[in-house]
Amino acid sequence: ATLGPTVTVGEILVEIMATTVGPGFLAAQPLTGPYPSGAPAIFIDQCGRMGCPSAMIGAVGSDDFGRVNLNRLQRDGVDISAVAIDPAFPTGSAFVRYRDDGTRDFVFNIATSAAARFGWTDRVQHLIASAGHLHVMGSALTMPSACEVIDQAVGIVKARGGSLSVDPNLRKELQLAPQIEARFARLVAQADLLLPSGDELERAAGIDGEAAAVARLLGMGVEEIVLKRGAQGATCFGRDGSRVDAAPFRVSEIDPTGAGDCFGGAYVASRRLGLPVEQALTYACAAGARNVTFRGPMEGAGTRAELDGFNASTPRGF
Ligand code: ATP
Ligand code: MG
């Protein structure tokens, strides 16, 4: 890609899943994992698999959960030179169990793990000095260490003509502290590409209604808004007034975790590789849909050839 790699910043985790459906972890039960995870890590892994030069800033512990992540990212072509290995804190983790109604119970260890303990180092400086694109997940803003890196990185990447994408990735229930909400708003205003899902669009715009929210964000200078609609597909709204609706692939969902992140990784990679919006949306919808057919947050991230094969063999339509 022009200018240098696509870089993301944030939490690197393992996910450990209950293999049965039910409420939480109050009794001994079968588990599976560790699976490499963390929204930014899933995003960048999909980006790397698409063949886009990609790199990650974050941290893992000096343990097998860290190695599971580093091995996966490296296998998939992601530059991990700016992933720190914390000697004292363990790799972040998320234990997840689905309930009968499809909602989830979590036990997280993020804030007190290596995942949240990184900062601006020489390696980060070196990477950002050559980055062509920065992708930020709203969820990373809950970590002060990530905020510090993101603040500096946005300025440097934009000053050298690079671009910024933002996936709000903020669950409705997640209330941000006022200064973090303000930071999120500033980031949205600087974004070239926004990748919201559901009501994140209205939250990012600060106004109700899809059309009003899109108009306000485009008016603020955002070039492209790609709205993720789950099993209904996705829509790209361009600053030039264009609108492209992408039909969903018809799949049976096994594990919804990571769909939005794979979608984003494939979309950003496609655009960075110079593909037009329509084709980028096809890769993105294929990446999201393919990933939900695999158990594990990034197990279904596809290479470009795998996504082409998926596209050719999977029914698609509204
Ligand atoms: P996440 O749950 O990972 O945060 P998200 O809410 O950010 O995801 P979704 O809209 O759920 O994003 O999924 C992203 C994209 O993946 C969708 O726009 C769609 O293209 C594809 N996708 C997700 N789930 C399905 C599904 N069940 N069937 C077909 N396509 C899907
Ligand atoms: Mg999401």
Image (tube, rainbow, N blue to C red):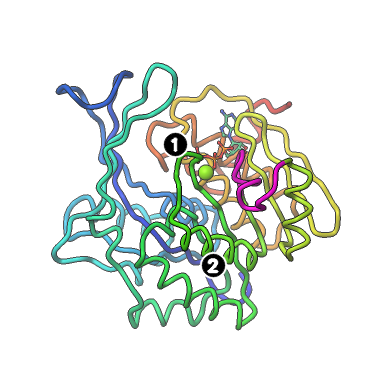
Question: Exactly how many numbered labels are in the figure?
Answer: 2
Q: Is residue 243 magenta?
A: no
Q: Which mark is residue 257?
A: 1
The residue under the point 31% across, 35% down is 106
- Amino acid type of disc 2? Leu
Dot 2 falls on a residue whose secondary structure is strand
Question: Is residue 216 shown left or right of residue 250?
Answer: right
Q: Which residue is mark 2?
A: 134
Question: Is residue 212 shown left or right of residue 193?
Answer: right
- Amino acid type of disc 1? Thr
Q: Which mark is residue 62?
A: none
The response on whether ligand 1 sits within 8 Å of label 1 is yes
Task: Say above or below: 1 vs 232.
Answer: below
List x then y, in percent, for residue 244: 79, 44
List x then y, in percent, for residue 18: 27, 27
Question: Is residue 149 shown left or right of residue 281?
Answer: left
The residue under the point 53% across, 62% down is 182
The residue under the point 18% across, 55% down is 90
Q: CA distance from mark 1 to mark 2?
A: 23 Å
Q: Which residues are magenta?
A: 196-208
